[in-house]
């Protein structure tokens, strides 16, 4: 093992039993415990105390001190942490692989958005020409870069040079894992690895507001995904609660949850064509496919005086 | 809403089992959708959505719990 690998920080999530917090999040670096967080309930003061006292302690030392402490149900938060560390030691608990979040820190005012180019370089070229003319501050492609097109391999090679921020969609993710639907064209290992490393969500600023963009509900099924990850609440509300904003009957409940959102703008690409909703002071934008059954197109998100505007732009022929 | 259930008198607490779902979690949302709820907070009794968007008066909730308890015991 190299020095770099030895110093690598590994992140874990342990789902508890019998105690108030539902999860314990912690990190290990060179067998030392870091950033312990008890998530979803319990005594916040005591949890912080435990966390601070255990910072940088060796795994074995912590287990020895905490194992067997009882509070309720014959266990306790520290006892559950000891159980988590024992699970790490025995290999039962693997380091988590939650979604990869890319961040753009500088405030933007106009963002081009598009989804599902589906391996069609002809449409992509027309899109790039449009983006060149309209010149947004940034452009985001919301996944499913790959498609049922023979050009997948060459197209992905060329995408490595683009300025468009590419997010991984479910089809791309399945390609990366060699689990693409039957019948899709093959892809080299190099391209699959490239797909695997794409960011899966994007945090940005549009004007004064924080926005988040994510592609589809496959993120909720990633190994290690936690309901308490950054923007997991936004994903949960979009995908699980409202079925991609299609079930408007639950919007009163959504409105009750938006005060807990980190994002004021939520952009996603699943569940149909283009859409824009304002619920509880949050703008929800559903991005439609570039290569869909209707006329191909993209969208421009523009912030003006605190209001978000979505302009739907058809691709021109030339 | 959960607090209004937790402060019910002891004799009521003894005949009920309380479960609270965290709506930030997928499990909570799944339960919300199973109950066909539309808004928050919501209270279900015996898997039936009874109160939505409102916190009932304690007397009202006690009466509803007792009514259900009596009906169940009569059936048994």
Image: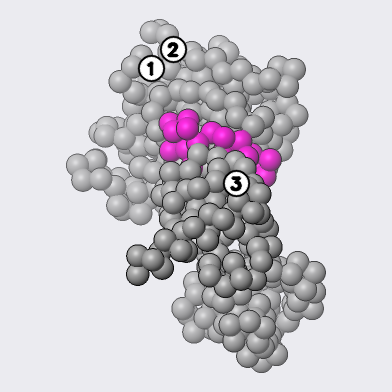
* Quarter of the C terminus of chain A within the rendering: top left
**Which SS class for mark 1?**
loop
Q: Tell me whether marks 1 and 3 sit on the same chain.
A: no
Q: Residue at x 71, y 17 (%)?
A: A304
Q: Farthest residue in the left direction? A: A183
As for residue A121 lying within the magenta part, the answer is no
Between the residue at mark 1 and the residue at mark 3, the CA separation in whole angstroms equals: 42 Å
Q: In this view, does B19 lie to the left or right of A46?
A: left
Residues beneath discs 2 and 3 located on the same chain: no
Question: Which mark identifies residue A267?
Answer: none
Q: Where is residue A70 in the image (x, y as percent from the top left)?
A: 65, 87
Scheme of image coloration: one colour
Q: Which chain carries label 1?
A: A
Q: In this view, does A35 lie above or below B21?
A: below
Determine the residue positioned at 63% across, 90% down.
Answer: A68
> Dot 2 falls on which chain?
A
> Dot 2: within a 10 Å radius of its alpha carbon, few (fewer than 14), some, or many (20 or more) residues?
some
Which residue position is annotated with label 3?
B41
Q: How many neighbours does mark 1 have within 10 angstroms: few (below 14), some (14-19), or many (20 or more)?
A: some
x, y percent for residue B51? 55, 46
> Where, quadrant-wise, is the N terminus of chain A in this rendering?
bottom right
Residue with the mark numbered 2: A314
Q: Name the residue under label 1.
A: A296
Element type at marker 2? strand
- Foreground residue among A277 and A36: A277
């Amino acid at each position: 093992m190299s020095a770099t690998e030895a110093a690598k920080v590994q992140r874990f999530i342990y789902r508890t039993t019998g105690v108030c917090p539902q999860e314990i999040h912690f990190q290990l670096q060179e067998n030392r415990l870091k950033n312990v967080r008890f998530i979803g309930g319990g005594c916040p003061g005591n949890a912080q105390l435990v966390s601070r006292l255990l910072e940088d302690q060796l795994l074995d030392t912590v287990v020895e001190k905490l194992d067997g402490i009882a509070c309720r149900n014959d266990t306790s938060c520290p006892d559950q942490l000891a159980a988590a560390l024992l699970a790490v030691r025995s290999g039962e608990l693997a380091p988590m692989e939650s979604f990869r979040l890319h961040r753009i820190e500088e405030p933007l005012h106009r963002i081009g958005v598009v989804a599902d180019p589906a391996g069609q370089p002809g449409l992509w070229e027309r899109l790039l020409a449009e983006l060149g003319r309209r010149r947004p501050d940034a452009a985001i492609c919301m996944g499913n870069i790959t498609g049922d097109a023979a050009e997948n391999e060459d197209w992905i090679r060329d995408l490595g040079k683009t300025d468009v921020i590419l997010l991984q969609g479910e089809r791309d993710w399945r390609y990366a894992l060699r689990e693409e639907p039957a019948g899709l064209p093959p892809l080299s290992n190099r391209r699959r690895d490239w797909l695997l490393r794409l960011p899966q969500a994007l945090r940005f600023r549009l004007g004064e507001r924080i926005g988040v963009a994510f592609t589809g509900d496959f993120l909720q099924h990633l190994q290690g995904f936690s309901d308490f990850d950054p923007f997991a609440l936004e994903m949960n509300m979009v995908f699980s609660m409202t079925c991609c904003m299609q079930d408007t009957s639950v919007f009163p409940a959504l409105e009750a949850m938006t005060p807990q959102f980190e994002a004021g703008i939520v952009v996603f690409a699943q569940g149909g064509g283009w859409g824009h909703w304002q619920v509880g002071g949050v703008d929800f934008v559903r991005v439609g496919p570039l290569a869909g059954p209707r006329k191909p197109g993209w969208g421009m998100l523009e912030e003006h005086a605190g209001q978000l505007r979505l302009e739907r732009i058809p691709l021109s022929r030339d | 809403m959960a607090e209004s259930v937790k402060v019910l008198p002891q004799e009521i607490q003894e005949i009920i089992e309380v479960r609270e779902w965290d709506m930030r979690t997928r499990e909570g949302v799944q339960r919300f959708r199973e109950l066909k709820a539309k808004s928050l907070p919501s209270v279900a009794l015996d898997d039936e959505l009874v109160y939505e968007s409102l916190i009932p008066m304690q007397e009202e909730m006690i009466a509803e719990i007792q009514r259900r308890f009596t009906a169940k015991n009569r059936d048994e």
